[in-house]
Image (cartoon, rainbow, N blue to C red):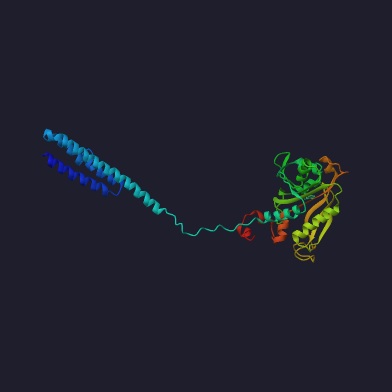
Amino acid sequence: MDIDAFQSKLNELQSEATRRIRQAESKDEAIKAKNAYLGRDGDIQEMMSIIGELPDEDKPTAGRIANEAKETVKSAYEARLEELEQLQLERQLDEESVDVTLPARTPPARSPHPIAEVESELIDVFTAMGFEVAEGPEIETDFFNFEALNFPEDHPARDMQDTFKTTDDHLLRTHTSPVQIRTMQAYQPPIRIISPGRVYRCDDDLTHSPVFHQIEGLLIDADVTMAQLKGTLRHFAEETFGDETSMRFRPSFFPFTEPSAEVDIGCLFCDGEGCQVCGDTGWLEILGAGMVDPNVLETVGLDPDTYTGFAFGMGIERIVMLKRGIDAIRHFFENDLRFLRQF
Ligand code: PHE
């Protein structure tokens, strides 16, 4: 073979190799094509061994053009690999593409939970009268939940609120009244607070749940009278249940108020005629209230001869049930969307 034949054979192999490489549809195909020419037994590689058979003066030229051919094929291979990668990426983007013209999904309409809603309505009623919102912990000590509120140890009044204990001295608060004590310890009169929050009792039936919500009220100042308590609660009843709502105070007992009262409103369902909801009495009990007991004032270091005050506490669920005609308290805590979506 002379140098011309060598050159034309090499040209032929080079264009064959680059064509095959450019046509490769995958990385594997490209590798195979490259190896067929540049691999150990590849066609171009074999041309290298022929160089030795050429006349001496042609050997350098032959070596140079053989190397050039190898380089050309190698760069064709590298270029194809890059192309294939790019194609692969485009295909992937195509498959995963997002149709930005699709209409957005509308999030479902949201509304506050009926308890949260009524709670904030009640807060509005009382803050408009000058009460401020105060909060306290749900895990309380025996002192704040009972003792400071004048519940003597072993007194049967504690049975009214059979409790969940967490330690010997800690319990899930059974009412929001401990916030009365915490507030009186922290601030000097005049004090006007309401305190909404969760409370816990060992109770579970149609109208009682082991967890429920209360809103507490406390007002301490010089010369506070029971008439002011009545006026405050009357305004609350009218704002909450309507201007025509009637209200009555029944004597009752709470260790931390004296005198104490149970407050009823005229039945909203039968106008006082008597029905199933009011148990034929014509009245609905909605809260407990009274004048702060002097013993409680003394416990927090206030002089009962200087200060008097009133307190009240009501269950929020009960008020929501009455306002919205809900027949069982458990609906509030079951998170059943069929119930919640109605509000
Ligand atoms: N804490 C009482 C209860 O849970 C309600 C109450 C509050 C009564 C304030 C009088 C004064 O039943």
Image coordinates for residue 144, horizontal then vertical, percent: 76, 42
Image coordinates for residue 87, horizontal then vertical, percent: 34, 50
Q: Residue furthest right?
A: 305
User: Which image quadrant is residue 271 in?
Assistant: bottom right
Number of labelled discs?
0
- Frontmost residue, 213 versus 278: 213
Q: Is residue 331 left or right of residue 97?
A: right
- Frontmost residue, 10 versus 175: 10
Give the quarter of the figure containing the N terminus. top left
Image coordinates for residue 172, horizontal then vertical, percent: 71, 44
Q: Is residue 223 left or right of residue 243?
A: right
- At a point 27% along the width and 42% down the height, the residue shown is 75
- At a point 22% along the width and 43% down the height, the residue shown is 36
- Frontmost residue, 325 versus 230: 230
Q: Is residue 140 above or below residue 115?
A: above
Q: Is residue 172 left or right of residue 231?
A: left
- At a point 82% along the width and 40% down the height, the residue shown is 299
- At a point 25% along the width and 43% down the height, the residue shown is 34
Image coordinates for residue 249, horizontal then vertical, percent: 83, 56
User: Which image quadrant is residue 188 in?
Assistant: top right
Give the quarter of the figure containing the C terminus. bottom right
